[in-house]
Amino acid sequence: MSTLTRFGVSMDETLLREFDRWLQSKDYANRSEAVRDLALHALTQTASHSPEAHVAGTITLIYPYKVRLRPVHTSCHPSIIISANLQVHLDPETCLKVMVVNGPAADVQELADQLLGMKGVRGALTVAAAHCQSEENDDEQNSN
């Protein structure tokens, strides 16, 4: 079980007022929750660029219905697990596809780049969680 540590943050008054408006618009109960979430987001984004990171997230694609996406075969990316695949017709001409993926950061990024690089396809890769192999090793060593 982890313990909480308190620390102070100094901030310009103008920035603090803007931060308070932002966290109120996001329904945070207090500044601590918002700072924790921002720190976790920043660390997740940084870790997701690490070669040994394992990431989980979504690849969101928006494309004209007439565009046929190349099939995504897990045999081409055996290290990536596609947990879910949702396709919605937004209107008669536009599709939205969301793929829930997890695997090595570099492989997930490559798959996203291949799909998003297709003509007429827009979208984004959103990394929701990242876990570095070196962090796992540190955790194992600390528990022994």
Image (spheres, rainbow, N blue to C red):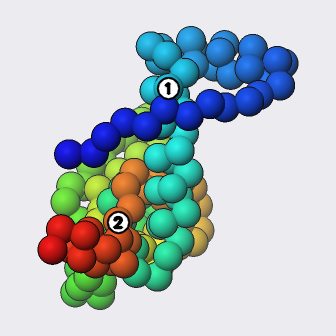
Residue at point 53%, 71% (across, down): 49
Secondary structure of residue under mark 2: strand
Which of label 1 and label 2 is nearer to you? 1
Looking at this view, is 113 or 66 the one in front?
113
Residue 131, horizontal then vertical, whole percent = 35, 65
Q: Judge whether residue 111 can be spotted in this image.
A: no
Residue 92 quadrant: top left
- Among numbered discs 1 and 2, the one appearing first in the sequence: 1
Looking at this view, is 76 or 34 the one in front?
34
Where does the C terminus fall, quadrant-wise?
A: bottom left
Secondary structure of residue under mark 1: helix
Q: Residue 139, relative to residue 44: is it above or below?
A: below
Q: Residue 144, relative to residue 14: is it above or below?
A: below
Residue 120, horizontal then vertical, whole percent = 58, 61
Q: Which mark is residue 131?
A: 2
Looking at this view, is 144 or 17 the one in front?
144
Q: Judge whether residue 13 can be spotted in this image.
A: yes
Residue at point 33%, 60% (across, down): 56
Is residue 96 rendered to the left or right of residue 143?
right
Q: Which mark is residue 81?
A: none
Residue at point 77%, 28% (across, down): 11
Residue 77 quadrant: bottom left
- How far apart are labels 1 and 2 at the CA level? 23 Å
Q: Which mark is residue 32?
A: 1
Q: Amino acid at mark 2?
A: His
Where does the N terminus fall, quadrant-wise?
A: top left
Residue 46, horizontal then vertical, whole percent = 55, 63
